[in-house]
Image (cartoon, grey):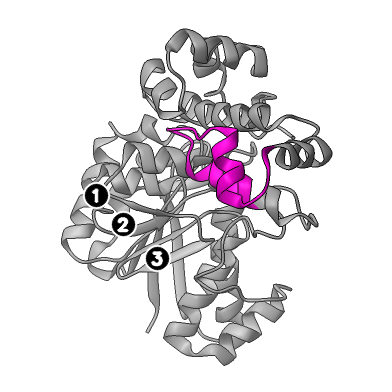
């Protein structure tokens, strides 16, 4: 029996995450010599839609979906998912599918749209790590996960990119066994099928790679866990069990910054995600990033990014292929 999938895309959707989800299903069909999976791409109004990488795809309108045969609805989005919150066709359809018990899947920032439609309450979901803080901040009812993909009952989600391959392979495995899963992975040259508990940014790679000093890694982890209410450097040093002087030397050696500067930049990076990816006010963002005032936050923001938060809110919402905006600064 064919598993019917409707893939709903928005303007500037994540093309790689979407096609990466589809291709293992295509391989499974080919290898099994049966149409195990059938998918079509839809959008609210149908017609040509531009992906975030500039490519164009043709879509059918959402009302064309045969809901009586629908087994999975996938929502794929990327930049500015909040622009689609007022899309009555999309939001009403998601709510209707949820009421009918049709499994829902989010690719990249599709999780924001599912959350806005009320489908992620008391569920765990993921999105691209660049948007995770925003998902947690604006949707406190959602358990935001930094795993590559999440399978939580009827709610599936993937951070995008090649993580979508792993999610699709797990769907194949659950329905048709892991012999076909392995064959499909081999066919598309996916060398290792990753599990549901694997994080987007592996500790061995972020933020300093395989540094010989566990002390600085522990210090950075403490900083990441305390962005809204920053700890003092002496407190961090005490918690990781090294002297403040030694911690200072470690930061200078491995980051070429002081611990204070590194911590401030980390908080500003979080602030930039909120500025460009949410509707939060600047004062709310400043407080969420541990700054005592809007003025302090705005001055530090301009020094770091050479643009004010209000200006960045406009510039940062230009689709990625048309701008040069380094959301993740190198340290």
Query: Magenta stretch containing residue 223, yes or no?
Result: yes
Query: Closer to the camera: disc 3 or disc 2?
Result: 3
Marks 1 and 2, how far apart in space? 10 Å
Horizontal side, residue 44 vs residue 205: left or right: left
Q: Is residue 206 visible?
A: no
**Rendering coords of residue 195 (x, y %):** 55, 74
Horizontal side, residue 66 vs residue 15: left or right: left
Could you say which quadrant of the image residue 50 lies in? top right
Q: Which mark is residue 22?
A: none
Q: Which residue was labeled with disc 3?
A: 5
**Rendering coords of residue 165 (x, y %):** 58, 67
- Residue contact at pointers 1 and 2, CB within 8 angstroms: yes
Q: Which residue was labeled with disc 2?
A: 65
Magenta stretch: give its range. Answer: 218-244
Q: Mark 1 or mark 3, which is nearer the start of the sequence?
A: 3
Could you say which quadrant of the image residue 229 lies in? top left
Horizontal side, residue 92 vs residue 205: left or right: left
Q: Residue at x 56, y 61 (%)?
A: 199
């Amino acid at each position: 029996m064919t598993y019917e999938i409707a893939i709903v895309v928005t303007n500037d959707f994540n093309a790689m995450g979407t096609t990466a989800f589809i291709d293992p299903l295509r391989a499974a069909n080919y290898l099994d010599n049966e149409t195990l999976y059938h998918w079509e791409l839809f959008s609210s109004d149908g017609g040509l839609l531009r992906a975030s990488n500039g490519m164009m795809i043709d879509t059918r309108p959402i009302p064309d979906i045969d809901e009586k045969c629908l087994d999975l609805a996938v929502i794929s989005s990327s930049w500015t998912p909040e622009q689609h919150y007022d899309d009555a066709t999309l939001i009403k359809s998601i709510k209707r599918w949820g009421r009918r018990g049709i499994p829902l899947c989010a690719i990249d920032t599709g999780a924001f749209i599912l959350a806005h439609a009320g489908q992620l309450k008391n569920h765990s979901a993921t999105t691209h790590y660049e948007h995770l803080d925003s998902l947690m901040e604006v949707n406190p009812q959602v358990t935001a996960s930094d795993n590559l993909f999440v399978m939580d009952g009827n709610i599936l989600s993937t951070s995008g990119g090649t993580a979508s391959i792993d999610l699709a392979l797990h769907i194949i495995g659950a329905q048709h066994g892991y012999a076909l899963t392995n064959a499909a992975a081999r066919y598309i040259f996916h060398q290792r099928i990753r599990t549901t508990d694997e994080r987007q940014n592996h500790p061995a790679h972020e933020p300093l790679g395989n540094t010989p000093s566990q002390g600085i890694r522990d210090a950075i982890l403490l900083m990441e866990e305390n962005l809204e209410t920053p700890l003092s450097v002496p407190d961090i040093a005490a918690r990781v069990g090294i002297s403040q002087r030694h911690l200072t030397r470690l930061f200078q050696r491995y980051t070429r910054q002081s611990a204070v500067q590194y911590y401030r930049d980390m908080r500003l990076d979080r602030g930039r995600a909120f500025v460009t990816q949410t509707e939060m006010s600047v004062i709310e963002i400043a407080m969420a990033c541990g700054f005592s005032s809007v003025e302090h936050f705005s001055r530090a923001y301009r020094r770091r990014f050479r643009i004010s938060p209000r200006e960045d809110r406009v510039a940062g919402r230009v689709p990625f292929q048309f701008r040069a905006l380094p959301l993740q600064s190198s340290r």
